[in-house]
Image (tube, rainbow, N blue to C red):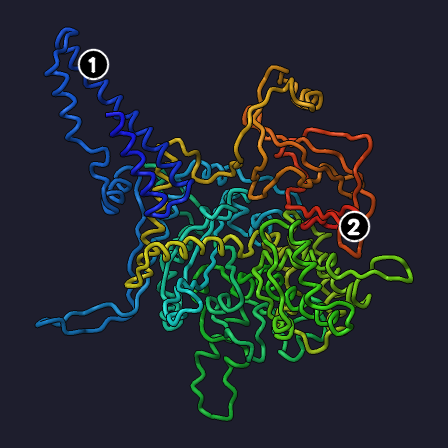
Amino acid sequence: MEEKGKFLSAELLITLTDKLNATQKVSNYVVNAVDKIFQAVLEVIQKRLTEKCAENDGVLDFHEINAVIEGIKECSVFAGLKGPDDILKYIKEEHGVVLPEKVVFLTKKVVKGDNIKEIDVDFAYVVPFKPALEEVLSCPEVMLCVKKPLPVKEGVFSSPLDGYFYRNHPIVKEHPEALGFGLYHDGVEPTDSASSKSGVHGVTLIYWSLLNIYPHLRSSVKAVFLLGAVRSSVLKKYGFAKILESFIETVNKLMNGLYLNINGKLLLFYGLFVFCCGDNPASALIGGFKQSHFADFHCRQCLVYCKDMYLHFEDDLFPKRNKDSHLAQVQEIEAYENPDSSMQNPSVKYGINERSALMSIEGCDVTKCLVQDFMHDTIMGTLKVEICCLLSHVLEKKNMKLDVINKRIANFGNFFGVNKPTEISSAHIEKRNLRQTAAETLSLAYILPYALRIWNVITSQREPACDEANFNCYILKLQLVDLMMSKVLNIQDVDTIRSIIKNHHTAFQALYPGEETPKLHYEVHMGTHILLYGPPSQFWCFRYEAKHAYFKRLFRIKRNLKNLVKTFSYSHQRKQAGLMLLSVKGNHGPFLTSENSYGAPKQTIVLKSQFKDEICSEIPDISLTDSTHQFEVCQVNGIKYSKKSAVVTAFHNYIPVFGEVERIFLFQNVLYFIVRKLDTNAYEKTLHAFRVSYTEPKGFEVIRASSLVHPHKLNFVKTVGGYFIGVPGLNYFRK
């Protein structure tokens, strides 16, 4: 029996890894799960034998024991759970699941055999918003966020709820715990971009977020909830009205107070719609604006004539769109019937296609709620263009060759983690279209100051391989990116952002005439959006784009194109409900969590550590005989740390004090870093980084991971000229 059991176990693992191509992580999970199930079966056998023994005065013969075992052998540990429908039924019974509903736009009659049937041609699947909201609020950690909002400091912005729109709203002033909602939508192309079917099966996914969830929890993709799925071609034909009907109806009721069923109790909630984020075509589509740039006034925030967008770069100098004028323009467009072919269509003039479905939400102003996305407008937009312009300028001066630049970028890319930039071709530069992801573009932006340096024989120093004016303009751009990536901003920072935008855009226009793009103008309005909705990192599209990855992986697994929107929406809702069930009944922790992840642990005794004095000084409750778990790598709030990583340990007169991670250990479920102290020598403008040096003699300190004053990924670059640390997200101008 032992040999047979071992063979069956080996057969399972071989099938998983070599036949079904499961990863080692999956195999390990299956092994642990089977062991738990086996222990549960043994407990059942033990219980049955104990009960039988009690019935027979503590005596059991062979036949009675055999009968108990035979009765159990007839059962299956997966009884009632052998198929997807069975699992869905179990989730419904144990926890509940909000399944999407079909919304039909167009039907047609077809002949099938001897019958005429009506089939759905154009349709969408929409998750009913009220039940979905009740399910989310049933999570204890979500309800805690709602009932105990984070404290707000006047003039400080760290979340959308700190913005003036939410804080000054009449509903929030009367009900401080009011719910705030954000929307996002974007198209997903599940098939290979090189496939002949590319573009045919495009699906638009609409998400919603509960902005009351704390920022560190809302950064999880599990905090992005599905509202609907529809074929992109169908959405363009019929718009958002029917798809958003459930969302709009519930939000309008919440503005006047609505009772929601939370874990069997009716509780009164108030809420409001805050903003909708997305790239420019997506935002224009949901806002009823033209998606192209051929309208006379194609900015969604102001009424600047298209030819006057680059005359100046100050937000206050542009005439703003407002709700009343926008409504009047929509009515003018709706009344237009083209009585005279010489008369200009008002939709072309105003850049408005139709009345937006969002206008059905009470108090919604589509001229303000469609926020500018920092990821698409800056990182994937103006930053990419400026990188191409700078590289083109360097190549024209013939100070460096492109193959040398690529080689240097590859070498320095080793200091920037997994998001290493790919090779740049001359065609990429000429077309102003780098083939880089947003994360790769950010890495490339910070690498360039290191890569574009040449040795000046006259001054015996390394200098940028470009003109000083071009380099200064580029550094201004990096400083702007740093500020916009900050997790906390204040009023002074907004003024700084506006000043940098004005100075940078003016310099860029003078250096690279003809390279202006509408996104340069869109950035001018970023200061206003920060005041209304908080830091750009709170409404950029990175998390939503990460959510798309789930559906792309799902398509590669399912390979089902028959009804892709149904497959996507049903699978997502079942997954969400299943994870919530595991959270409620299992040992998987909260549904939304910011738990840290670690590498393989190594147990060590404090007494044997060379840092025992520092550890005991920082942790008074620890003794020399206690054990700690050390790790080579860990991940805290999405940021990966390992040995030799750089961290900011403090600020001295607004200048960062750095340390280098020497050890990572866990004691009583608290994560600590042992860091070697570094001296901050100076800020090197030519590298947009701080020059540091190692202190002598060596000094170390122990810091809690939760106490890091600047929890960003830092770039620790070691060059011939010394050691440099770049600090994304740091405001270099705050004094």
Name the residue nearer the viewer: 366 or 382.
382
User: Which of the two discs, 2 and 1, labels the residue nearer the N terminus?
Assistant: 1
Measured along the vertical axis of the image, is residue 631 above or below residue 323? above
Furthest residue to the right?
A: 458
Residue 464 in the figure: left or right of residue 118: right
Q: Position of residue 663 (x, y in %)?
A: 64, 31
Residue 174 in the figure: left or right of residue 318: left
Mark 2, residues whose alpha carbon is within 10 Å: few (<14), some, or many (≥20)?
few
Name the residue nearer the viewer: 94 or 35.
35
Q: Position of residue 142 (x, y in %)?
A: 46, 40
Residue 515 in the figure: left or right of residue 540: right
Measured along the vertical axis of the image, is residue 58 above or below residue 397? above
Q: Is residue 267 visible?
A: no
**Residue at the disc numbered 1:** 50
**Residue at the disc numbered 2:** 720
Which residue does the image show at 22% across and 73% down from the upper left? 108
Q: Nearer the viewer, mark 2 or mark 1?
A: 2
Q: Which mark is residue 297?
A: none
Q: Is residue 360 visible?
A: yes
Furthest residue to the front?
A: 3
Which residue does the image show at 26% across and 21% down from the upper left? 43
Q: Position of residue 387 (x, y in %)?
A: 68, 66
* Quarter of the figure that contains the N terminus: top left
Instruction: Check disc 2 and report its element: helix, strand or loop.
Output: loop
Mark 1, residues whose alpha carbon is within 10 Å: few (<14), some, or many (≥20)?
few
Kindly identify the amino acid type of the residue bearing the numbered disc 1: Thr
Which residue does the image show at 46% across and 37% down from the upper left? 141
Q: How many marks?
A: 2
Measured along the vertical axis of the image, is residue 161 above or below residue 447? above
Name the residue nearer the viewer: 509 or 462.
462
Instruction: Check disc 1 and report its element: helix, strand or loop.
Output: helix
